[in-house]
C-alpha cells in the first residue's frame, strides 16, 4: 500500500504552477553571483575530508564561504519544496541534477560532515530516499561523480 501511494504521488501530472516554480528556480540559478558560486562549488571545490569542507564552511573569513552556503541552501530549499508537495517530484528530478551532483560529490565524507553538521544536505538525501525517480537520478549522477573524482 505504501509503495503504491508513493508511486501514485510521483506519477501525478505536473501542473502549470509546478512549471512556474521550476522556471523560477532556473531563473534564480542564472543570477550572476549564483552562477559564480555554482561554478566554484561544482568545478573547483573537491574536499576529500570533512576538515577541508569545514575549512571553508566554518570560516566566515574565507571568500568562498558565502558561495558554499548560497549554493547548498538553494538546493536544500528546492528539495524541501518537493518534499512538502509544492512542486512535482518527477518534474523537479527531470529538470534538476545539480543538487544530486552535490550530494554525490560529498558522499565519501557525508557521515564525517554530519557529525558536526547533522542537517547537511538532509533534504536532498530525503528526496533521494522518498522518490524512485530521484533515487535513479542520484545513482546515475553518483557514477559520473566517481569517474570525475578518479580523474582529479
Image (spheres, rainbow, N blue to C red):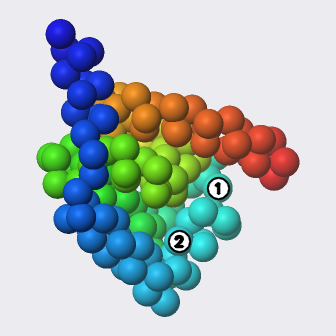
Cα–Cα span, label 1 and label 2: 13 Å
Percent coordinates x, y for residue 129 in the rendering? 35, 28
Q: Is residue 58 above or below residue 28?
A: above
Percent coordinates x, y for residue 94 in the rendering? 46, 50
Percent coordinates x, y for residue 86 in the rendering? 17, 54
Say whether residue 56 is visible.
yes
Which residue is at 56% across, 54% downward? 52
Q: Residues within 10 Å of mark 1 (few under 14, many from 20)?
A: some
Disc 1 marks which residue? 46
Does label 1 or label 2 sit earlier along the sequence? 2
Q: Are marks 1 and 2 in contact (CB under 8 Å)?
A: no
Determine which of the numbered discs, if any, sits on residue 38 in the image: 2
Which residue is at 49% across, 65% downward? 56
Quadrant where the image shows the N terminus: top left
Query: Which residue is at the front of the view, 28 or 4?
Result: 4
Q: Residues within 10 Å of mark 2 (few under 14, many from 20)?
A: many
**SS at circle 1:** loop
Amino acid at each position: 500500500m505504501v509503495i503504491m501511494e508513493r508511486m501514485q504521488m510521483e506519477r501525478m501530472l505536473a501542473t502549470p504552477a509546478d512549471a512556474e516554480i521550476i522556471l523560477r528556480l532556473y531563473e534564480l540559478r542564472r543570477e550572476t553571483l549564483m552562477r559564480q558560486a555554482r561554478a566554484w562549488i561544482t568545478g573547483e571545490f573537491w574536499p576529500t575530508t570533512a576538515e577541508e569542507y569545514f575549512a571553508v564552511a566554518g570560516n566566515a573569513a574565507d571568500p568562498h564561504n558565502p558561495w558554499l552556503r548560497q549554493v547548498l541552501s538553494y538546493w536544500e530549499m528546492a528539495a524541501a519544496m518537493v518534499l512538502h508537495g509544492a512542486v512535482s517530484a518527477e518534474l523537479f528530478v527531470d529538470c534538476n541534477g545539480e543538487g544530486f551532483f552535490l550530494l554525490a560529490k560529498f558522499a565519501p565524507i557525508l557521515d564525517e560532515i554530519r557529525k558536526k553538521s547533522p542537517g547537511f544536505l538532509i533534504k536532498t538525501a530525503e528526496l533521494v530516499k522518498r522518490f524512485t525517480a530521484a533515487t535513479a537520478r542520484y545513482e546515475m549522477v553518483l557514477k559520473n561523480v566517481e569517474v570525475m573524482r578518479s580523474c582529479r
